[in-house]
């Protein structure tokens, strides 16, 4: 997809800071270091716009990027970082839960998983949570360039099995390094907007 306009809008820490223009929102969830910022930068074709989302301690920020004046990518804080405190973990849980249960413009969550490894406990919890709130999910298995093509299918199968992938959800194979999956992921997003 051609990106004509992209703007970092806000790092929101409170719901009243979320945009109120009702444009459709696509949130990105994933473990710290999974490659979320790289994926956002690849999707919007701006090298350094998404900063690394895994800054530990920034467990309450939702970063909003407006794309082509028609939708938002919403970057969740990275989860699973060992050194965050119990309080921060609880804050993360509370904010995400409120967002997932209340956020009207949310169309889909793009859940980013490293293709090299089986999903973590936190990945599985996140997916269960999304399903609990009945939110459409696209699992994006990223860093595909890091394993041989011949292993892609097997790794994807294990990830889908262990996460309990539901019919109706989407999956896209991705690499921020090569751009693999970029157009396919935009197609998934555009279809969800059109629905
Ligand atoms: P975040 O913490 O989830 O935002 O992760 P980053 O986007 O900062 O990525 C973490 C590390 O993985 C960085 O060193 C990236 O360069 C690297 N990385 C991210 N995506 C890919 C990818 O698709 N392929 C390769 N080879 N490296 C990647």
Image (cartoon, rainbow, N blue to C red):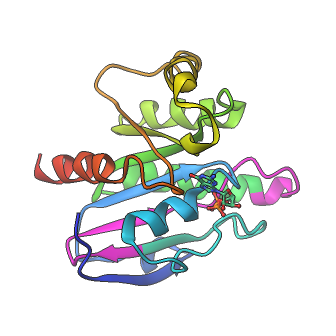
Relative to 45, is 190 above or below? above
Kindly indicate the quadrant of the structure image that contains residue 64.
bottom left
Q: Is residue 159 visible?
A: no
Range shown magenta: 65-88
* Left or right position of 120 against 103: right
Q: Residue at x 70, y 70 (%)?
A: 58
Q: Residue at x 79, y 52 (%)?
A: 81
Front in this rendered view, residue 144 or 136:
144
Regarding ligand 1, which quadrant of the image does it lie in? bottom right
Q: Residue at x 17, y 47 (%)?
A: 191
- Whether residue 80 appears in magenta in the rendering, the answer is yes
Q: Residue at x 23, y 76 (%)?
A: 68
The x, y position of residue 31, in whole percent, is 66, 48
The x, y position of residue 128, in whole percent, is 53, 29
- Whether residue 60 appears in magenta in the rendering, the answer is no
* Left or right position of 137 against 155: left
Number of disc labels? 0
Q: Is residue 20 visible?
A: yes
Relative to 188, is 119 above or below? above
Kindly indicate the quadrant of the structure image that contains residue 67.
bottom left
The x, y position of residue 126, in whole percent, is 57, 38
Which residue lies most toward the left here?
194
């Amino acid at each position: 997809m051609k990106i004509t306009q992209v703007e970092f809008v806000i790092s929101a820490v409170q719901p009243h800071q979320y945009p109120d223009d009702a444009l459709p929102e696509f949130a990105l969830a994933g473990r710290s270091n999974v490659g979320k910022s790289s994926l956002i930068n690849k999707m919007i074709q701006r090298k350094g716009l998404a900063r690394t989302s895994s800054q530990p301690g920034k467990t309450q920020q939702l970063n909003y990027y407006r794309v082509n004046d028609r939708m938002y990518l919403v970057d969740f804080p990275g989860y699973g970082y060992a050194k965050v405190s119990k309080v921060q973990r609880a804050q993360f849980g509370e904010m995400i839960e409120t967002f997932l249960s209340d956020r009207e413009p949310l169309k889909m969550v793009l859940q980013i998983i490293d293709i090299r490894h089986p999903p973590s406990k936190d990945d599985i919890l996140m997916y269960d949570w999304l399903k609990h709130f009945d939110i459409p999910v696209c699992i994006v298995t990223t860093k595909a360039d890091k394993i041989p093509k011949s292993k892609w299918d097997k790794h994807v199968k294990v990830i889908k099995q262990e996460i309990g992938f539901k019919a109706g959800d989407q999956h896209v194979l991705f690499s921020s390094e090569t751009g693999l999956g970029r157009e396919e992921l935009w197609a998934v997003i555009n279809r969800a907007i059109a629905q």
